[in-house]
């Protein structure tokens, strides 16, 4: 019933309730259906987009909860706290960590010692775990500890009066 859209593209604009039909010419160099196709099977979508499949768990990193960090601070345990959030986030709220944004962490190893515990924190603990994996893989760090829950965990358990974002 009616005509097929072979060789044509049907466009519908719902904002103005209009339609158009465009003619589409076959391209002989098309890698899918041209004269000499090079794409002959489905691509791995996750790999193409840089998505890590959920079935592949990230490598575990050493972790510490906010109560333990608070205890370390009260007892004077020597350590360094690094905050890998962005400067605008740090401007909203911070808990005394040295700001080294995630995008610059690999170039900032001169600021990250290897001889004392280094606690790495972000907003929730995801970016800090990423920073730790990168530093361990590229620069061989073995003294890095992820602050689980990040600044959100700190606000919830230690300093609820701090501003939230």
Image (spheres, rainbow, N blue to C red):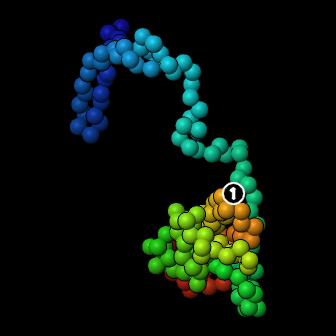
Is 105 situated above or below 45?
A: below
User: Measured along the vertical axis of the image, is residue 51 above or below residue 123?
Assistant: above
User: Which residue is drawn at the image coordinates 65% and 43% (left, top)?
Assistant: 53
Residue 80 in picture, x, y percent from top left: 66, 80
Q: Is residue 31 visible?
A: yes
Horizontal side of 9 relative to 84 (left or right) equals left
Q: Position of residue 113 (x, y in %)?
A: 67, 76
Q: Position of residue 81 (x, y in %)?
A: 64, 79
| Residue at 56% in and 43% down | 50
Q: Where is residue 26 shown, x and y percent of the image?
A: 34, 14
Q: Is residue 154 left or right of residue 62?
A: left
Please state, as top left, top right, bottom left or bottom right, where the N terminus lies in the image. top left
Q: How many marks?
A: 1
Residue visible at 52% across and 65% down? 104
Q: Is residue 126 visible?
A: no
Instruction: Give the residue displayed 53% in from the left and 41% down from the top.
Output: 49
When asked about the image quadrant of residue 99, the answer is bottom right
What is the secondary structure assignment of the residue under circle 1? helix
Disc 1 residue crowd, few under 14, some 14–19, many 20+, Cα 10 Å: few
Quarter of the view holding residue 82: bottom right
Q: Quadrant of residue 162?
A: bottom right
Please give the residue where the numbered disc 1 appears in the rendered image: 137
């Amino acid at each position: 019933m009616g005509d097929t859209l072979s060789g044509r593209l049907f466009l519908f604009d719902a904002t103005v309730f209009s339609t158009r039909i465009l003619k589409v010419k076959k391209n002989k160099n098309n890698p899918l259906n041209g004269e000499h196709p090079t794409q002959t099977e489905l691509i791995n979508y996750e790999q193409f987009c840089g998505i890590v499949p959920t079935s592949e768990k990230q490598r575990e990193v050493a972790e510490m909860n906010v109560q333990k960090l608070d205890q370390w601070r009260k007892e004077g345990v020597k350590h360094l706290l690094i905050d890998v959030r962005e400067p605008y986030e740090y401007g909203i709220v911070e808990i005394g960590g040295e700001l080294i944004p995630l995008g610059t962490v690999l170039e900032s190893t001169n600021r990250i010692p290897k001889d004392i515990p280094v606690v790495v924190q972000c907003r929730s603990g995801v970016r800090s775990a990423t920073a730790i994996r990168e530093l361990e893989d590229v620069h061989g760090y073995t003294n890095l500890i992820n602050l689980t829950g990040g600044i959100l965990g700190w606000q919830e358990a230690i300093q609820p009066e701090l501003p939230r974002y």
